[in-house]
Image (spheres, rainbow, N blue to C red):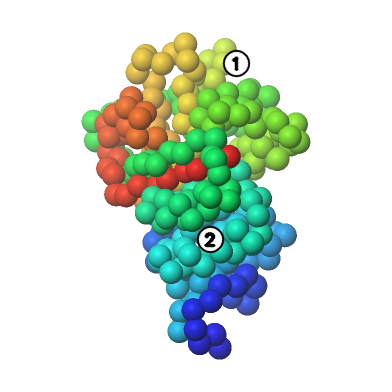
Amino acid sequence: MLTQTTTRVLEPGDLGAALAVLESEPVANAFVTSRVQVAGLDPWRLGGEMWGWYDGGRLRSLCYSGANLVPICATPDAVRGFAERARRAGRRCSSIVGPAEATAYLWRLLEPSWGPAREVRAHQPLMVTEQAPATVRPDPYVRRIRKDEMDVIMPACVAMFTEEVGVSPLAGDGGLLYQARVAELVGSGRSFARIENGRVLFKAEIGAATSHACQIQGVWVDPEYRGHGLSAPGMAAVIRYALADVAPVVSLYVNDYNTPARAAYRRVGFREVGAFMSVLF
């Protein structure tokens, strides 16, 4: 048994303890929890390592280290331990993202060796809802994307990603990994859009899903149709699908400077319950 504070890479046998930590904050941890529930803790299947912070022999905090570096239920002592391991390993991720307080501290410790960042989004409100909108009628034309519509939805997904992140998802491997992820969401029935004459006007996905909570991502409206009232009804439709088929709590996080999006989310019943932070490289 580990009897002092220490960090180590978790192994498949640690799955139960890791899930207990993840499920202690089901909304904030939905992204990582959904991956662990499917892939376990084997790094090859998970797409990265799961680091554990032990105090007095008990697993207290986690940090997912893959394409993203994600502190999970991380105490200040745990953040220091994770930062030291990350410094030794060198930067392999394209972003650091997680609850704002822990992520900000982790970045302060890593910035001298990993910086500068391409962009820091210090405050991204985390929003949740547990019920269908009371005052916004769901857009009846928003529906699940079919598998044979990948060529229709993919350009909208690329446009959304490029606009949101600032780089194209087609860079590097030509978009193979990104296309596989989009196909996975379409295949699992978690990709939604309003399509008219072969053109995507609104789209969104349920990117992470557990039995306790799910997370909406990739919300996008065709630039020519922004301001036409598509966002709130479109989100209302996605919320309806999510609550009926996926989980009892629907969440998302949004850039604090995106005033129109935050207003639309509040219209359909989302409320702020915390904040995330993202460091982009």
Inspect this view and state whether residue 34 appears: no
Q: Is residue 26 above or below residue 142?
A: below
Q: Earlier in the sequence, mark 2 or mark 1?
A: 2
Mark 2 secondary-structure assignment: helix
* Left or right, residue 179 beside residue 73: right
| Callout 1 crowding tier (Cα within 10 Å): few <14, some 14–19, many ≥20 | few
Q: Which mark is residue 266?
A: none
- Place residue 45 in its image quadrant: bottom right
Which quadrant is the N terminus positioned in?
Answer: bottom right
- How far across and how far down the image is residue 121, in percent? 43, 38
In the rendering, which numbered label is found on residue 198?
Answer: 1
Q: Secondary structure at mark 1?
A: loop
Residue at coordinates 35% horizontally, 18% vertically from top-left? 229
Is residue 184 depicted above or below 47 in this figure? above
Please tell me the numbered disc located at residue 83: 2
The Cα–Cα distance between marks 2 and 1, rounded to whole angstroms, is: 47 Å
| Residue located 45% across and 73% down the image | 60
Q: Amino acid at mark 2?
A: Ala
Residue 112, horizontal then vertical, whole percent? 53, 50
Direction left: furthest residue: 135
